[in-house]
């Protein structure tokens, strides 16, 4: 009898752990074949913390709980590590404008009780959709423009031409829209902003470009922000870049 009680208690403990509510943010997101920094929000649960924070379909989630979001799987891992009721800071792009807010995560079970989407539904769930299929020719054209941007960044204090970099960024923008003419899956900022990320051994460098205004945000290997909005628009601004950043740019591939 004692053994039976122990087994029952253990089973009840396992069941309780299995039923423990997981944190719910409330978005469906996907990565961009254009390697846009962050993940594109395809849908937002209207009763979720994300919606209450002002997020809408087409936004780009840049960071979650202090961590730069580079892939949908990373976002999923960050959600798995969070707790219901936890207050977390997020950053996202909405119509080309970055917004930094704080949200209190809900419990997934609690959202279900209010009639929100289940964990397997398309809208409001925290599973991540697969990236859209992209025509190989379009993908290669985008990669070619990206290589030209890398070439420019590697010579940022020597022969960098902001107008050419902006042109390549806009070309990527238009190709991205061509990859999905319906516009569902490509939202690079209504104000014309395009954001590209470049991974290095030291961390991540993010290039932002809109209306011929270029700047860099630099993160270390732990994805903690080191430098924010370093402008690249004039020779004086590029000469003022920290030496560490210039050396990292030279090693871009």
Image (tube, rainbow, N blue to C red):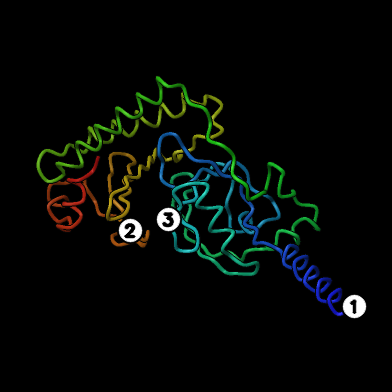
Q: Is residue 157 above or below residue 4?
A: above
Pick whichever, 119 or 87, lies toward us. 119
Q: Which quarter shows the N terminus?
A: bottom right
Number of other residues with Cα within 10 Å of mark 1, as a class: few under 14, some 14 to 19, many 20 or more: few
Name the residue located 58 percent from the left edge and 54 percent from the top edge. 54
Q: Nearer the viewer, mark 3 or mark 2?
A: 2
Q: Position of residue 186 (x, y in %)?
A: 49, 34
Number of other residues with Cα within 10 Å of mark 2, as a class: few under 14, some 14 to 19, many 20 or more: few
Q: Position of residue 129 (x, y in %)?
A: 59, 40
Q: Which residue is mark 3?
A: 68
Task: Give SS at disc 3.
Answer: strand
Q: Earlier in the sequence, mark 3 or mark 1?
A: 1
Q: Quadrant of residue 25?
A: bottom right
Pick whichever, 118 or 239, lies toward us. 118
**Which dot marks residue 1?**
1
Task: Give SS at disc 2.
Answer: loop
Pick whichever, 103 or 133, lies toward us. 133
Q: Which quarter shows the C terminus?
A: top left
Marks 3 and 2 close (CB-CB < 8 Å): no
Marks 3 and 1 sit apart, C-alpha to C-alpha, by 53 Å
Q: Which residue is mark 2?
A: 221
- Residue 133 is left or right of residue 201, and the answer is right
Marks 3 and 2 sit apart, C-alpha to C-alpha, by 11 Å
Marks 3 and 1 close (CB-CB < 8 Å): no
Name the residue located 19 percent from the left edge and 37 percent from the top edge. 152
């Amino acid at each position: 009898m004692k053994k039976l009680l122990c087994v029952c208690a253990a089973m009840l403990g396992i069941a309780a752990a299995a039923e423990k509510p997981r944190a719910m943010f409330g978005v469906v997101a996907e990565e961009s074949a254009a390697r846009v920094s962050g993940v594109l929000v395809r849908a937002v649960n209207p009763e979720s913390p994300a919606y209450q924070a002002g997020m809408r379909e087409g936004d780009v989630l840049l960071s979650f709980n202090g961590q730069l979001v580079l892939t949908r799987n990373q976002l999923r891992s960050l959600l798995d590590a969070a707790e219901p009721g936890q207050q977390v800071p997020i950053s996202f792009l909405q119509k080309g404008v970055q917004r930094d807010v704080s949200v209190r995560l809900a419990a997934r079970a609690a959202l279900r009780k209010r009639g929100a989407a289940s964990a397997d539904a398309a809208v409001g769930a925290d599973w991540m959709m697969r990236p859209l299929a992209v025509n190989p020719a379009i993908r290669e054209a985008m990669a070619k423009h990206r290589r030209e941007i890398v070439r420019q960044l590697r010579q940022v204090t020597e022969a960098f031409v902001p107008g050419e970099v902006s042109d390549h960024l806009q070309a990527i923008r238009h190709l991205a829209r061509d990859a999905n003419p319906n516009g569902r899956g490509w939202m690079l900022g209504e104000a014309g902003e395009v954001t590209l990320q470049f991974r290095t051994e030291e961390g991540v460098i993010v290039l932002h470009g809109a209306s011929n205004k270029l700047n860099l945000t630099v993160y270390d290997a732990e994805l903690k922000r080191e430098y924010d909005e370093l402008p690249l628009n004039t020779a004086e601004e590029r000469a003022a870049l920290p030496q560490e950043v210039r050396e990292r740019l030279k090693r871009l591939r």
